Image (cartoon, helix red, strand yellow):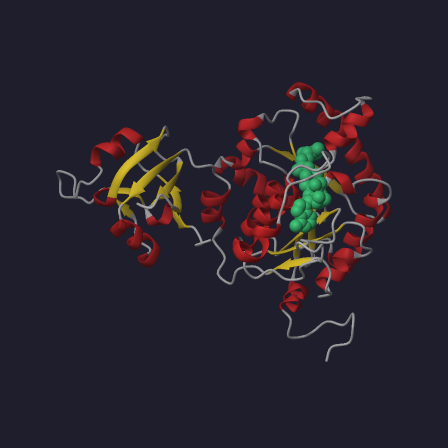
Amino acid sequence: MVEPGAVDPSHPRVLLAKTRRVILKIGSKSLTGDAWDRLAEDVAAYRGGHGKRGARSVVIVSSGAIAHGIQKLGLKSRPKDIAWLQAAAAAGQSILMQRYEEAFDKVGIPVAQVLLTHADLADRARTNNARGALGALLEAGCVPIINENDAVAVEEIKFGDNDQLASMVAPLVDADLLLLLSDVEGLLDAGGRRVPLVRSIATEARPLAGGSTSGVGTGGMTSKVEAARRATLAGAHVVIAHAREPGILGRVVGGEDVGTFFPAVPQRLSARKHWIAYTLRPRGAILVDRGAAEAICARNRSILAVGVLGVRGTFQPGDAVSVVDPDGREIARGLCRLSPSDAARVAGQKREEDGEEIVVIHRDDLVVLPGE
Ligand SMILES: Nc1ncnc2c1ncn2[C@@H]1O[C@H](COP(=O)(O)OP(=O)(O)O)[C@@H](O)[C@H]1O
Ligand SMILES: N[C@@H](CCC(=O)OP(=O)(O)O)C(=O)O
């Protein structure tokens, strides 16, 4: 029998005590009043004496630029026009940073602003630059404050929302915990009760999650659950919790039963494979026969032209594509070596004229998607 409020040593939440690198994502609706001070105190308590060159570090992914910009520019409601949304984001971002500067200054922790677009993370060289910069900031004892660079991001290069951005940053900084702070105490079931633990995202979380209702937040619970799926595959535990819970970070890593806990998968994807499957957007599709589908899923093989039935979309050699089985299910994603016309030309062909097998997607560039 475990005392109320005590940590059950057999519960998977004990895993959280080992976390060393945390991403704290905070939503627009929660960044009001003394939210910044409470975040700064939580981060300072978590890092303790371990901040500078130490064992524990924190990255913040912060929303709220547009909401603050709307107020600052005296707009009556959230603009529909993209240029006005960008203007609001630019005006609000500097307010956000001012609040972070003031709050973290009080606890003696330096902060640094990092603004990213999806196009930055879709390019391997730029991703590596971002990784280097974030690594240097953490080594210097800083807390990087990341937001989407909304002032230049148009629909095609948007992350979706900051829950997704946070899940793409997780493998970049090798985070072992993503804490999604919102205005709800976690994932709620149909009766409004908090779900404490999710082992299967497909069966236990997705059916419960809905969109955002307020007009201030962006993706709702659907987006947080999708972010949890991506981050857990990168080896990070995920907790969704209420931003107003006092001392939330310390309580989560202390194993307390707060929020909704999604344990990391035991076999994480490498950062590069995670990037191929969950940061890049598929530009087209390679349709494969049953033999090729089985070879990829069960035997970790490359996709050879002999198993290709057809090609869809317009893409360049090296772009990400979906791999689709004869039932129309997306079973994998990978980097296609050929252009669509070359892939279509060699489809079904056993070998090149010189006798070589024709690799369409090499297994090093191929990620089988979990069957959910
Ligand atoms: N099953 C659910 N459990 C909890 N919240 C849910 C659920 N389905 C939809 N939501 C909505 O998701 C919202 C949180 O997401 P969002 O509005 O995007 O917030 P944030 O700005 O914090 O990212 C909640 O306020 C709630 O209205
Ligand atoms: N980048 C936007 C936030 C986008 C977003 O995802 O918002 P939210 O759903 O409140 O986390 C901003 O700073 O206003």
Picture quarter with ligand 1: top right
Q: Position of residue 83 (x, y in %)?
A: 66, 19
Can you give x and y, in whole percent of width and height, for residue 38 in the image? 83, 49
Nearer the observer, 166 or 20: 166
Q: Does residue 41 appear anywhere in the picture?
A: yes
Placement of 91 over or under 297, stated as above or below: above
Front residue of 38 and 13: 13
Q: Does residue 363 appear to the left or right of 150 in the view shown? A: left
Residue 139 visible in image: no
**Residue 4 occupies quadrant:** bottom right
Q: Residue at left 59%, top 42%?
A: 164
Residue extending farthest to the front is: 191
Picture residue at 33% right of the left edge, 46% below the top: 327
Residue drawn at 38 percent across, 43 percent down: 334
Residue 354 lies, with reference to residue 200, above or below; the image says: above
Determine whether 119 is above or below 288 in the image: above
Nearest the eye: 361 or 325: 325
Residue 289 locus on image (x, y percent): 26, 46
Quick one: quadrant of the N terminus?
Answer: bottom right
Q: Position of residue 147 (x, y in %)?
A: 67, 36
Residue beneath the point at 85% across and 40% down: 102
Which residue occupies the extreme bottom position in the image? 1
- In the picture, measured across the screen, residue 310 lies left or right of residue 366, that is left
Q: How many marks?
A: 0
Left or right of 230 on screen, residue 61 = right
